[in-house]
Image: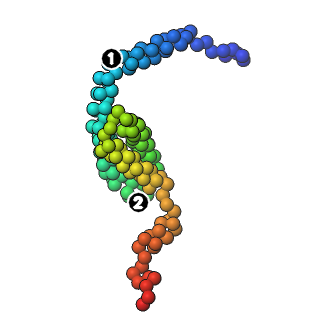
Amino acid sequence: MAAGARLALPERGISGSVKFMSTVASTLDSESRPILLERLVSDFPASAEEWSRSVNRLNRWEEEHLLVDNPSPEQLAAHRRRVERLVFFGQLCAIVAAHPDFGDFKTAEMVAATQEVLRNKLLMFHHPMPAQQAEQLLKEVFPEPGAGTAG
């Protein structure tokens, strides 16, 4: 391509995109909106529960692939991608669970708890505590028998 030449793009204007968005918006604003919303809200708890249960499968995978001496960088990378996908889906679940039309406190609590577990997994496997800090913490939490007592 010569200097200064421009790549020719197909002339498609934005009218096609605007028509599509108008169609989507009018569909969501029409009489079908309550039915669509009702279906999404009624199906959500089962979807959120399935997402939460996927953490159990992740736990088993971690036991097999990461809770070994020197897990491979490939296994750690695969784990990070998997957890990040689960975190993303959890963020979507949290948005739905927080919406006033949803009103299912039990599911909202489950979503929040599962998100916490996933955040902890990212920290534990991908941002581990330095060994010296871990040793100090263990000494503070589990002091040697007889330490600090008058003998």
Q: Counting other residues with Cα less than 10 Å from the Cα at mark 2, is it few (<14), some (14-19), or many (20 or more)?
A: few
Q: Nearer the viewer, residue 27 or 63?
A: 27
Q: Is residue 85 above or below residue 37?
A: below
Q: Position of residue 100 (x, y in %)?
A: 37, 35
Residue extending farthest right: 3
Dot 1 amino acid type: Glu
**Disc 1 target residue:** 31
Q: Nearer the viewer, residue 58 or 26?
A: 26
Q: Counting other residues with Cα less than 10 Å from the Cα at mark 1, is it few (<14), some (14-19), or many (20 or more)?
A: few
Residue 149 appears in view: yes
Q: Position of residue 27 (x, y in %)?
A: 37, 17
Compute the Cα span from label 2 to label 1: 59 Å
**Disc 2 target residue:** 69
Q: Residue 98's quadrant in the figure?
A: top left
Residues at discs 2 and 1 in contact (Cβ within 8 Å):
no
Q: Residue at x 44, y 55 (%)?
A: 124
Q: Residue at x 32, y 23 (%)?
A: 34
